[in-house]
Image (tube, rainbow, N blue to C red):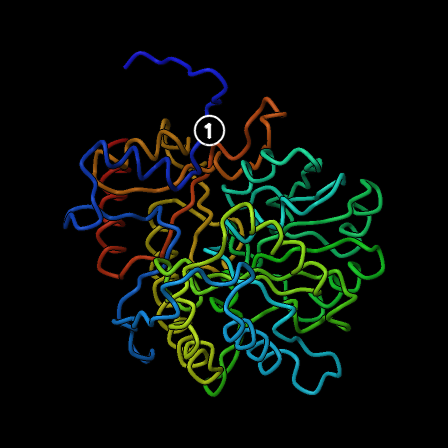
Amino acid sequence: MESHTIPGIRAVPRTGVIYVTHEATRHGFSYSHPDWSNLGQGSPETGEIPGAPPRVTEVTVSESSRQYGPVAGNKLLCQAVAEFYNAVYRRGKKSQYTADNVSIASGGRLALTRLASALGNINMGHFIPDYTAYEELLSVFKAFTPIPILLRAEDGYKISPEDLKEEILGRGLSALLASNPSNPTAQLIEGPELATWCAIARECQCSMIFDEFYSHYIYTGGNAAKPKTVSAAEFVEDVERDPVIVVDGLTKNWRYPGWRISWTLGPKVVIEAIASAGSFLDGGANHPFQNAALPLLDPRNAEAETSAIQKHFLKKRDLLLSRLKKMNVTADAQPAGAFYIWANLAKLPPPLDDGMNFFREGLKEKVIVVPGVFFDVNPGNRRATARYKNYCRISFGPEIERLELGLGAIDRVIAKFK
């Protein structure tokens, strides 16, 4: 079709996942098609997995929940979220979260959009590579200036606390956004290192916004009795004064992406600001599903789900790493969390050493991946040169049968060019 413009409307880019899914649909992809494997998906499998609590299959819509819910969220759910973090991460600490420290939104991107709209005229740090949706999020609001911080493969896509502090002070950052575990590199900040990050936030008075949507997908230990989870909330000293903000939800860690229920945890003044933003951005989250979410926040339910996730997804991670290695596709750093492999394609024969070419050849064999260039977060396209052309993100979110189907397709793609 001939392209044209409509006065006042700009071209809005799609995120990486939406772009590749859209392109695949043009080639015949659908989620129900038995021959396609979507290894580009940013969501986990949502069905029964061994050891997990039964899936919620019905939601009751009460008389009261047919009305609009509070913009900041159902108070009962806000309280349940606060109690969850207090029980799991803040047991014995003097400063505790309350319902006033929680805001509910319709998914993670909206929670982050509310936060972005509440930022002032500041420098806002972000890492590259990172989540594709951050790019447009960081460019559409003009009050703040996004400042990129490059994470290098030779450093395992991590930054030392000393270098982090230097970046904050040297660039005059008043806020910093980071996914932890990271999407797409699957690297993790935990333990004393994460405690130091929170101390730096206090010392430098830089608000740290932690996107913790993969914080239950941890592969660095724990024990059979209690799975390990990670949250910056553990290292907050004063819930009202520490500039530490956590965003999470049911999407990944509870495997209910379709519910579109997320929360933001932080000082009351932050919650009040983003609730005001929500009053004009969206008006509040889905009311009936907030009520249905309450039992899921029981720490015993969450622990059982997390234990099942970690065993099941670790098995899929190891399968994917092993098969890709045989195909000469490697990971620069061992995935410590999330459900992605940041796949280095440099050893493949041309043109497959380019992520976009690898993606397009994959479509011919009915498999989807996300080219690495989408994770070179570049708000406003201020940088002309794109990084990560030799990478793609491969997800082990799908069911193991779909994962094996996709690996077979990737094998066929590579075999064509040997």
Of residues 134 and 327, the one drawn nearer to the viewer in this rendering: 134
Q: Quadrant of residue 323?
A: bottom left
Residue 336 in view here: no
Q: Quadrant of the N terminus?
A: top left
41 vs 14, nearest the viewer: 14
Which residue occupies 71% across, 38% down? 144
Residue 384 spot, x, y in % from top left: 59, 22
Amino acid at circle 1: Val
- Residue 287 position, x and y percent, is 41, 64
Residue 389 horizontal side relative to residue 377, left or right = left
Q: Is residue 368 left or right of residue 31?
A: right
Q: Residue at image x 62%, y 58%?
A: 210
Which quarter shows the C terminus? top left
- Asked if residue 365 shows in the view, the reply is yes
Please state the horizontal and vertical placement of residue 311, each as a whole percent of the image: 38, 74
Residue under label 1, please give it.
12
